[in-house]
Image (cartoon, helix red, strand yellow):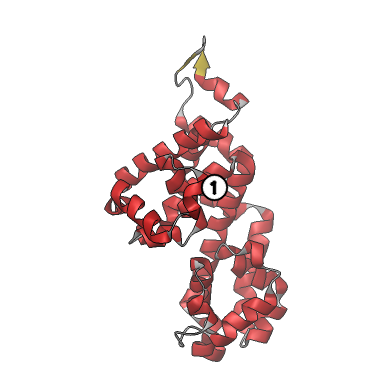
Amino acid sequence: MSVAVSYKLISSNIERSLAITASRGPVKLESAHYLKNRETISSIDEFLADTRLFKTAMIAFGLEDMAFAKGYMRRILEEGMGDPTSLGNRTTDPRIKEFARAFDFARFGADTMTRTATGQAVVDRFVRQTMELDAGANDGEGVRLALYFERMAPSIASPYDILADKALSQVVRTTLGLPKEFAAADIDRQAAVIEARVDLQEFSDADALRRFLARFTAMWDATEGVGRDPILNLFAVGGATRQTVSLDLALSLQALRLGGA
């Protein structure tokens, strides 16, 4: 299935996609473990020692690729976010900054894991992130990028917010048809190009954002050479493409891919 079609099917009923992901056995188990044990944790040592809980938290903030880097994350947590010179404040990775703000043991101490920000909010993020990871694995990296951009778009205030995030940058470069070499250009030059060609205010408008991501997924399909998926044949008759099944049925087919009933 093309990235454009897969993204539209998931995004058009995001709550259903999230519910399907949340109901999956492994996701339910890790979510329950996190909620059951988080309030028993009162220190950084205990947080890092519970590998399952720590991994859930890392996935929730998009840091699944760094779940093994406990030494580095310990330093982030120990230094906290109160000091402008702390490692968490100096990093350019927005994922780490968000994680450090939520799990700021330096500021909140033993109360860190009893806060609202480290409770159900983390599980909700974990489910969303898992859904995006599954979408990337099942339907292609372009789908994951589109879903991520959709989630992050309201927080984009300047071109530098885009450039600080590799995934956001990739979406914008693809949509604008910019070559990969553009990423190596001077950061201010990149920001100037994005500012001139993208109306960032549109990202706070649902319809405008939908149109932007439709352009992205179309460009992704065109440049990445997406193959045809058998499910897409349901929409094709005599070589012409038209909708021959309902959106509900298409979403049900998507649900089966995600592991739902």
Please give left or right for residue 257 compared with residue 125 in the image: right
For mark 1, what is the residue?
A: 144
Please give left or right for residue 1 compared with residue 192 in the image: right
Residue 230 sits above or below residue 11 on the image: above
* Among the 4 quarters of the image, the one containing residue 48: bottom right
Q: Residue at x 59, y 41 (%)?
A: 140
| Position in image of residue 155 (x %, y %) | 37, 61
Please give left or right for residue 242 compared with residue 129 in the image: left
| Position in image of residue 115 (x %, y %) | 49, 80
Quadrant location, the N terminus: top right
Residue 223 sits above or below residue 102 on the image: above
Q: Residue at x 49, y 71 (%)?
A: 98
Residue nearer the viewer, 69 or 105: 69
* Among the 4 quarters of the image, the one containing residue 191: bottom left
Quadrant location, the C terminus: top right
Look at the image and tell me whether residue 12 can be seen: no
As shown in the figure, which amino acid type bears the numbered disc 1?
Arg
| Position in image of residue 171 (x %, y %) | 46, 47
Given the current orientation, which residue lies at the most extreme top position?
Answer: 238
| Position in image of residue 57 (x %, y %) | 60, 69
Q: Residue at x 46, y 35 (%)?
A: 219
